[in-house]
C-alpha cells in the first residue's frame, strides 16, 4: 500500500490509499485546512500544587487503582496521579478510534452500501458497515435488483446475487468475552449489518439473516433470488473490475460527524469498530489496531504502554494511560476538525451517557466527555470549561469501589483550582508594581 506523508501544519499524518470496504475503490480525501497554531508539548514540571494536593485528597486510599491527568491548553500537566500507568480504558477507547477516523476520513465522509451489476447480469452487494442500514434500505435494494437483474435496462424476476461479506473469523475481535457476544453491545462487526446486527440482543448470524430477509422480500414482490456468498474485494484487480460494473442502487450512512456522535455520545460499539476499520482500510481488527497505534505514534503523543485491541473498548486487552488520553484531547482541540470532535461528546447533565450525571451542579453543561464502563472498570475523559480556559481531563479506574463519587469530586476540584492559585499570585504582584 503506497504511503505519503501530508503535513497539515498541525499533524503529521501517514496517508495511505485505504481500500474502500466492499468496493476496493481508492479513497481520495482532501487535506484539512491549514493551521498556523503550533502544538504545545507536555510540560510535566508546570504542576498546580493546589490541584495536585486536591486530587490526592479526593482519591484517598483508592489512589493506587486510579490514573488521573489534567492538562491546560499550554500543555502544562497541572495535576497527575499515576498518569503514566497503563490501564484498561473501557469505552474511553472510542476517543482514540473516533479521532483517528475523523482525521483520516474527514467530517463529511459517509459509509456506502452498493448494489452492483456485472457485465454478465449477475449482481453483487457490497457494504462498509453502515450502522443505520435498515429493513427499508434492504427493500430498496430488492426493488433495484428485481428491476435490473437481467441486464442493463431489462427487468427480471430471477436474480443471481453475490453478497460480499467478511469471514466469520472477523465478525468479533477474538478476545471479546463469549458472554458479551450475545448482547446488542457485542453484536458482530460485519460490512452488511441490518440494524447494526442487533434485534434486542445480538444477531448471531447476520449473513443468514440478510439472506433470509432478501429472499423473503423478493418472493413477496413476485421474484426470486439465488444468493451466493463471496469474499470482500482485497486486491487491485477487484478495483479494476469495478470499471465494468454498474451501480444499480446505493444507500449512504449519516455523515461522519453524526457517526462520531453515535460512537461517543451514545457509546455505540458497532459504530466505533467500523470507523476504526474504515479509517485504516483494514477489516482484520488486529491489523486495524496496529494501524491505529501507528497513527497515535505519528501524532507525537506520549503513548508509552499503549495497546490497541479494538475500536470500542469492549476488549480487556486495551491499555492506555490517562496522560495519553488527556494529550489526545489537547491535540484534537487544536485540530482543524476540532469542532466536530467536541460536538460528538456527551454533555454533563444534558446529553448522552452524561445526561444523568452532575445535573444542576456547577459541572452541568460545562463538561463534554466520554464515559466508559465494563466490570471493574470506570473511566471518564473530556473537556472541562473553566474560568481559566479549557482543561483536558482523563480519569481511569481499574478496581474503584466508588468511581462515580470520585469522578465528580475530581472534576469539581479541577474547576475550583482554575486558575491555579500559585500561578496567579505572580501576575497580581506584577500588576501592583506596574
Image (cartoon, grey):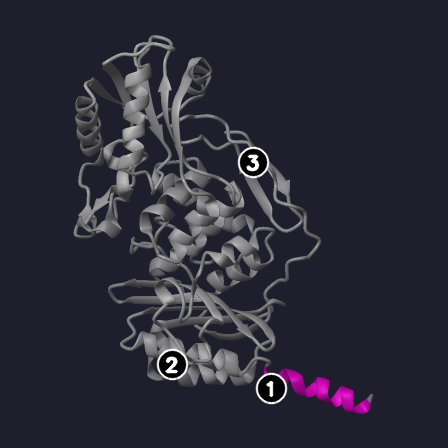
Residue sitting at x 64%, y 62%:
40
Return the residue nearer the eye: 4 or 363: 363
Residue that badge 2 annotates: 59
Is residue 206 found inside the magenta-colored segment of the image? no
Q: In the rendered image, is residue 176 in sight?
A: no
Kindly report the distance in space between the C-alpha atoms of the residues bearing marks 1 and 3. 46 Å
Between disc 1 and disc 2, the foreground one is 1
Residue 148, percent across and down? 33, 15
Judge the density around disc 1: few (<14), some (14-19), many (≥20) Cα neighbours within 10 Å.
some
Q: Is residue 13 left or right of residue 155?
A: right
The quadrant where residue 127 appears: top left
Return the residue nearer the eye: 237 or 31: 31
Residue sitting at x 42%, y 38%:
278
Judge the density around disc 2: few (<14), some (14-19), many (≥20) Cα neighbours within 10 Å.
many
Q: Are marks 1 and 2 in contact (CB under 8 Å)?
A: no
Q: Is residue 337 above or below residue 79?
A: above
- The answer to which of marks 1 and 2 sits earlier in the sequence is 2
Between disc 1 and disc 3, the foreground one is 3
- The answer to which of marks 1 and 3 sits earlier in the sequence is 3
Kindly state the secondary structure of the residue where label 2 is placed: helix
**Magenta region:** 420-433
Q: Is residue 233 above or below residue 137?
A: above
Kindly state the secondary structure of the residue where label 1 is placed: helix
What type of secondary structure mainly makes up the magenta span?
helix
Residue 142 marker: none
Residue 421 marker: 1
Judge the density around disc 3: few (<14), some (14-19), many (≥20) Cα neighbours within 10 Å.
few
Residue that badge 3 annotates: 29
Residue 237, percent across and down? 43, 17
Amino acid at each position: 500500500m503506497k504511503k505519503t506523508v501530508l503535513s497539515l501544519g498541525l499533524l503529521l499524518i501517514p496517508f495511505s490509499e485505504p481500500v474502500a470496504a466492499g468496493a476496493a475503490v481508492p479513497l481520495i480525501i482532501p487535506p484539512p485546512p491549514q493551521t498556523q497554531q503550533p502544538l504545545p508539548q507536555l510540560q510535566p514540571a508546570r504542576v498546580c500544587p493546589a490541584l495536585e494536593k486536591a486530587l490526592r485528597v479526593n482519591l484517598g486510599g483508592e489512589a493506587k487503582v486510579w490514573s488521573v491527568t489534567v492538562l491546560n491548553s499550554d500543555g502544562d500537566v497541572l495535576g497527575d496521579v499515576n498518569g503514566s500507568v497503563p490501564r484498561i480504558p473501557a469505552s474511553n477507547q472510542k476517543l482514540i478510534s473516533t479521532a483517528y477516523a475523523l482525521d483520516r476520513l474527514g467530517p463529511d465522509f459517509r459509509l456506502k452500501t452498493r448494489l452492483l451489476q456485472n457485465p454478465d447480469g449477475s449482481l453483487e452487494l457490497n457494504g462498509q458497515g453502515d450502522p443505520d442500514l435498515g429493513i427499508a434500505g434492504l427493500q430498496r435494494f430488492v426493488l433495484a435488483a428485481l428491476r435490473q437483474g437481467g441486464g442493463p435496462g431489462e427487468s427480471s424476476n430471477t436474480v443471481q446475487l453475490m453478497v460480499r461479506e467478511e469471514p466469520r473469523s472477523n465478525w468479533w475481535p477474538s478476545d471479546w468475552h463469549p458472554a458479551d457476544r450475545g448482547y446488542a453491545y457485542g453484536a458482530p462487526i460485519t460490512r452488511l449489518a441490518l440494524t447494526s446486527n442487533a434485534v434486542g440482543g445480538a444477531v448471531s448470524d447476520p449473513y443468514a439473516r440478510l439472506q433470509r430477509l432478501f429472499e423473503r422480500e423478493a418472493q413477496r414482490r413476485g421474484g426470486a433470488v439465488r444468493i451466493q456468498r463471496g469474499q470482500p474485494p482485497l486486491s487491485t484487480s477487484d478495483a479494476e473490475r469495478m470499471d465494468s460494473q454498474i451501480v444499480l442502487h446505493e444507500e449512504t450512512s449519516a455523515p461522519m460527524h453524526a457517526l462520531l456522535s453515535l460512537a461517543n455520545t451514545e457509546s455505540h460499539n458497532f459504530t466505533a469498530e467500523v470507523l476504526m476499520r474504515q479509517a485504516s482500510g483494514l477489516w482484520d481488527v488486529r491489523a486495524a489496531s496496529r494501524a491505529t497505534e501507528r497513527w497515535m505514534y505519528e501524532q507525537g503523543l506520549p503513548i508509552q504502554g499503549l495497546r490497541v485491541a479494538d475500536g470500542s473498548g469492549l476488549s480487556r486487552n486495551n491499555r492506555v494511560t490517562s496522560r495519553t488520553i488527556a494529550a489526545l484531547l489537547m491535540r484534537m482541540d487544536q485540530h482543524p476538525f476540532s469542532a466536530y470532535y467536541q460536538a460528538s461528546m456527551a454533555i454533563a447533565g444534558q446529553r448522552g451517557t452524561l445526561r444523568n450525571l452532575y445535573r444542576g451542579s456547577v459541572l452541568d453543561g460545562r463538561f463534554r466527555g466520554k464515559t466508559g464502563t465494563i466490570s471493574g472498570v470506570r473511566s471518564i475523559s473530556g473537556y472541562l470549561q473553566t474560568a481559566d480556559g479549557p482543561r483536558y481531563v482523563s480519569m481511569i479506574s481499574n478496581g474503584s469501589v466508588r468511581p462515580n463519587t470520585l469522578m465528580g469530586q475530581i472534576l469539581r476540584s479541577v474547576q475550583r483550582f482554575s486558575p491555579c492559585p500559585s500561578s496567579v499570585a505572580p501576575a497580581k504582584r506584577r500588576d501592583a508594581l506596574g
